[in-house]
Image: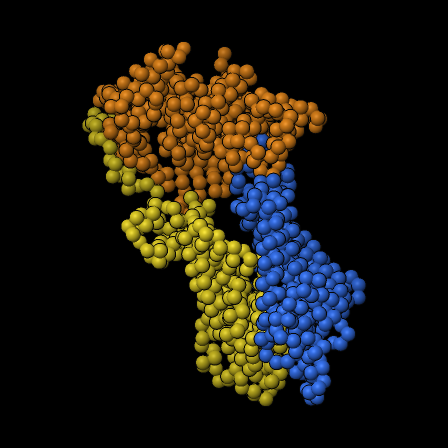
Chain colours: A yellow, B blue, C orange
């Protein structure tokens, strides 16, 4: 704090002419305005668990697509070797009807993933429509639509699914219908919440005054803004659906033989646990791995999107 | 508060009515006759049976009877087992399921909270990784797989607990664990993240500024608030424990309501399916209501004013 | 005669972020004497709150890093102290008032208990006495019916009342130093005045030293003995209130004075806004950090960081304009006129 300026050495008078501000420099430098999605992507990448989740899902999807196509066995071939332990010919062993478990696991992956993803997409469509209509229109429409959501969500989900499956013929389609019959309620709530918070922001008001239709608002403004919350909900819906499918298969309400899903395989495997534990182990392992991966991705997404952590 | 409770009860009653109606008509529309399994009935016997169960009445009479009986908590006779009513089955199975369910809930909350706290206290250090990994495993592995693995390794290979059956405390441990672990995982995750969030709150900073010690802050300030979300999870937990019991009771051959329910599904014993479903629905919906009320009593911030929670 | 209570020497604090190392505080020096009020003024992001949190050692590590410097409280450096040792000082010798009373109180604990906690932690008194003291404190900070209020939860209090509770908590152990971090920013204007009045009264009664953090120069004139102006993590000018208000030397201080709204503003006079935005402390600029926004920037400002120049015994400023070679620059006309007016108002007030 003393006279330190002596230490600066040569200070020529030339250096003391007024040159004025360099505002361009000041305005260029302010905090790098990284775009929102770029930042989300950055944070997501930092999350090792979430990234490994993406990789696991990619590998499982690839195997599910290609293994049944290129394998020498098919999921329904009965090969005459029953309950054989994993070997060179049958990597995951064979089951009680002499079918190759490896092929069946990847065939089952198709069915399980198909069920999970389709159920999530149906949830998405109904939920987004319901939620955005309810939120956008407000007033009485909103009241009635949300009352319906309240009542539906009071009904225990699994009971409805079970009752429906008891009544319907078993199969892939009834399973998907049953899973999505009340599943969309959650999505509708989340979308409505987002809509309400976005609805009165300037850009939506501006679009309104410019005469944008409601449909235009939903597609161009609300969905992009609610995308984060929607994505998270979807990634967390898929594992729930896969889980529920497995659960229902166990109650004997799953897809029919000889079609395999992970759920039906695991529940059959339970019966043969003592003689052929691999019949439970492999499908169970992949159910767990998939659920783990989806959860990791979903959590990672949520954390990456959370504005509270942004700085 | 009272207005809110009344509103919620009305919702529940409407939902119950929907369930009763839907199950009734779905069961009517269901393929196959309940007596289809026992083939070779002479027609007069079948007619007799139909008359006995009221199946030859027009649908609206049946529907009316069914509604009235439901109001009287009379869920009808089993179509499979003579001399057994759905109420008998519930009376016999429910206490067993309740005991198992309560034990599972205790384990889920206890383990979940414990692991969550450990993970949050040692954030990003070794104990956190261990606790989080166990929680993630608990969430990812379906309960029936867990049940199968425990039966195989702990009972068959190590012989620590009985494989199956229902005969005292020893028989409850594995099934309760199998039901509880998934939920313990969720609770652990919940507690961990809410504790970490509370740690960044202003009031924790103020508590630090007061000069309170680390542990005083954890036990007197953070923990209390961080555990609030666990109460909201009690609703889904009840539902999860009930549905979990369907499978687990089957695997461990426990004579609870869940097992009877599953058997009635395999037998297509429609009256029992309907009755049990309605019973479960009542239990679950009121459990969720009670949890919500409890939450508002415990957390002074939340006031229910007709419009529900913010 | 005047004893220094707190000396901050060359304090440097960095934060590790995913984008790199942010230098939030870049060498801050100041001294606070007993019974004195020092105001630290600056825009948000200037490092004033970081400085105040640093004194309490409330900077979370990581991501925060105490990179350099000393914080001498009664001659003892606080930086090397462990959290445990520090917790004996926090709340007891140094207390803090937070910006947002809505979030600073624990929502699930009764207000009285939150005050008692401090007393029981730092003073060896029995519970009932702590309770009496807590009620007395509530009364002192102007909360009506303190016995009843004692048993209520924070959500039953208004914003201004909550801030009074926060002040009561800060006073509970009778600290020597009170750090008020924008204590009125989150409050309504009328409530602001009441809270400021309360703080002044407390200081008079207890002779507590106060560090008053604010972005609002207007508040400072009434509250402080001395003022430090912060910009981009450094103190750019400090002096007595008179020095800063009537003889400011740093162009940034001119800008702050010019941008201060006041009630007697003539309609023809526009509020002045400093153009541009503060520098990114991820990459602090070379030379004088304020230069890019400075109307009177010198060539040297973009090359070399200016030292602290002494204006008078009490007044220092960090600008090359005070160098003997620098051209004579007059304070811009509208700001001079404003200063004149402050002077008149101040004269009227006294």
Q: Quadrant of residue B158?
A: bottom right
In the displayed structure, would residue B294 be above or below residue A170?
above
- Residue C126 appears in the figure: yes
Q: Residue at x 30, y 25 (%)?
A: C258
Q: Position of residue A257 (x, y in %)?
A: 56, 81
Front position in the image: C349 or B120: C349
Q: Residue at x 64, y 39 (%)?
A: B220
| B293 left or right of A215 in image | right
Q: Residue at x 55, y 32 (%)?
A: C157
- Residue A224 appears in the figure: no
Q: Residue at x 68, y 52 (%)?
A: B110
Q: Position of residue C14 (x, y in %)?
A: 43, 38
In the displayed structure, would residue C39 be above or below residue A257?
above
Q: Position of residue C213 (x, y in %)?
A: 44, 27
Front position in the image: A214 or B118: A214
In the displayed structure, would residue A178 be above or below residue A41?
below
Q: Quadrant of residue B282?
A: bottom right
Q: Position of residue C263 (x, y in %)?
A: 34, 21
């Amino acid at each position: 704090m003393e006279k330190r300026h002596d230490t600066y050495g040569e200070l020529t008078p030339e250096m003391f002419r007024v040159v004025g501000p360099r505002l361009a420099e000041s305005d260029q430098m302010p905090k790098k305005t990284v775009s929102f999605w770029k930042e989300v992507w950055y944070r997501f990448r930092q999350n090792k668990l979430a990234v490994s989740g993406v990789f696991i899902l990619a590998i499982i999807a690839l195997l599910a697509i290609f293994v049944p196509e290129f394998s020498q066995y098919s999921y329904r071939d009965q090969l005459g070797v029953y309950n054989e332990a994993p070997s060179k010919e049958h990597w995951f062993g064979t089951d009680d009807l002499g079918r190759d478990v490896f092929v069946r696991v990847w065939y089952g992956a198709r069915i399980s993933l198909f069920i999970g993803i389709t159920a999530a997409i149906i949830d998405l469509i109904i939920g987004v429509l319901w939620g955005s209509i309810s939120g956008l229109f407000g007033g009485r429409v909103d009241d009635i639509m949300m009352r319906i959501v309240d009542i539906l969500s009071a009904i225990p989900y699994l009971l409805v699914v079970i009752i429906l499956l008891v009544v319907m013929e078993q199969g892939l389609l009834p399973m998907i219908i049953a899973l999505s019959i009340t599943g969309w309620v959650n999505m509708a709530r989340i979308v409505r919440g987002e809509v309400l918070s976005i609805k009165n922001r300037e850009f939506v008001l501006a679009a309104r005054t410019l005469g944008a239709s409601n449909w235009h608002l939903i597609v161009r403004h609300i969905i992009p803004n609610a995308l984060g919350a929607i994505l998270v909900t979807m990634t967390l819906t898929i594992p729930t659906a896969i889980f529920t499918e497995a659960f229902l298969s166990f109650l004997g309400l799953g897809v029919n033989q000889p079609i395999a899903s992970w759920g039906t395989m695991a529940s059959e495997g339970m019966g043969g646990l003592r003689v052929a534990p691999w019949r439970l182990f492999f499908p169970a392992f992949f159910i767990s791995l998939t659920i783990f991966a989806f959860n990791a991705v979903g959590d990672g997404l949520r954390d990456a999107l959370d504005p509270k952590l942004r700085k | 508060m009272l207005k809110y409770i009344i509103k919620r009860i009305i919702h529940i009653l409407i939902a119950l009515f929907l369930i009763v109606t839907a199950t009734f008509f779905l069961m009517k529309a269901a393929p196959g006759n309940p007596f289809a399994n026992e083939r070779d009935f002479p027609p007069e016997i079948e007619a007799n049976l139909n008359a006995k169960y009221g199946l030859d009445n027009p649908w609206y009479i049946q529907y009316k009877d069914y509604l009235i009986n439901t109001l009287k908590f009379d869920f009808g006779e089993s179509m499979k087992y003579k001399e057994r009513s759905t109420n008998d089955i519930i009376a016999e199975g429910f206490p067993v399921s309740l005991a198992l369910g309560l034990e599972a809930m205790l384990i889920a909350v206890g383990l979940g909270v414990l692991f969550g706290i450990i993970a949050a206290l040692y954030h990003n250090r070794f104990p956190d990784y261990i606790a989080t990994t166990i929680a993630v495993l608990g969430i990812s592995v379906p309960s029936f797989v867990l049940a199968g693995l425990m039966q195989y390794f702990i009972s068959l290979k190590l012989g620590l607990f009985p494989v199956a059956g229902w005969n005292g405390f020893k028989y409850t441990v594995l099934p309760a664990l199998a039901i509880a672990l998934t939920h313990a995982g969720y609770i652990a995750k919940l507690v961990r993240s809410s504790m970490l969030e509370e740690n960044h709150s202003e009031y924790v900073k103020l508590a630090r500024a007061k000069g309170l010690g680390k542990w005083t802050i954890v036990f007197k300030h953070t923990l209390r608030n961080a555990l609030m979300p666990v109460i909201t999870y009690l609703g889904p937990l009840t539902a999860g424990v009930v549905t979990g019991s369907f499978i687990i009771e089957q695997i461990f051959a426990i004579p609870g309501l869940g097992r009877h329910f599953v058997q009635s599904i395999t037998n297509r014993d429609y009256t029992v399916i309907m009755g049990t479903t309605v019973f479960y629905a009542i239990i679950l919906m009121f459990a969720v209501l009670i949890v919500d009320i409890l939450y508002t009593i415990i957390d002074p911030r939340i006031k229910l004013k007709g419009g529900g929670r913010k | 005669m005047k004893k220094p209570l707190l000396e901050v020497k060359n304090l440097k604090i960095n934060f590790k972020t995913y984008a790199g190392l942010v230098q939030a505080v870049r060498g801050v020096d100041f001294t606070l004497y007993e019974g004195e009020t020092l105001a630290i003024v600056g825009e948000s992001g200037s490092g004033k709150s970081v400085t105040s949190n640093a004194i309490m050692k409330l900077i979370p590590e990581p991501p925060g890093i105490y990179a350099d410097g000393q914080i001498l409280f009664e001659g003892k450096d606080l930086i090397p102290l462990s959290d445990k040792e520090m917790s004996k000082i926090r709340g007891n010798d140094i207390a803090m008032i937070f910006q947002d009373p809505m979030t600073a109180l624990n929502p699930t604990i009764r207000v009285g208990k939150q005050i008692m906690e401090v007393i029981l932690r730092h003073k060896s008194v029995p519970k009932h006495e702590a309770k009496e003291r807590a009620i007395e404190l509530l009364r002192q900070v102007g909360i009506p019916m303190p016995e009843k209020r004692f048993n209520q939860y924070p959500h039953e209090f208004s914003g201004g009342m909550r801030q009074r509770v926060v002040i009561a908590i800060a006073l509970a152990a009778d600290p020597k130093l009170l750090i008020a971090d924008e204590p009125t920013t989150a409050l309504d204007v009328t409530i602001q005045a009441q809270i400021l009045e309360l703080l002044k009264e407390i200081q008079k009664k207890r002779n507590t030293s106060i560090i008053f953090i604010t972005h609002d120069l207007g508040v400072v004139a009434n509250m402080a003995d001395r003022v430090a102006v912060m910009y981009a993590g450094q103190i750019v000018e400090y002096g007595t209130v008179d020095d800063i208000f009537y003889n400011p030397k740093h162009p940034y201080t001119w800008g702050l004075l010019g941008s201060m709204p006041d009630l007697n503003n003539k309609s023809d006079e526009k509020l002045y806004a400093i153009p541009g935005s503060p520098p990114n402390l991820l990459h602090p600029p070379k030379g004088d950090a304020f230069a890019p926004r400075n109307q009177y920037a010198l060539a040297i400002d973009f090359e070399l960081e200016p030292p602290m120049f002494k204006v008078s015994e009490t007044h220092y400023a960090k600008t090359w304009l005070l160098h003997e070679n620098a051209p004579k620059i007059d304070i811009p006309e509208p700001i001079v006129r404003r200063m004149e007016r402050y002077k008149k108002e101040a004269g009227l007030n006294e």
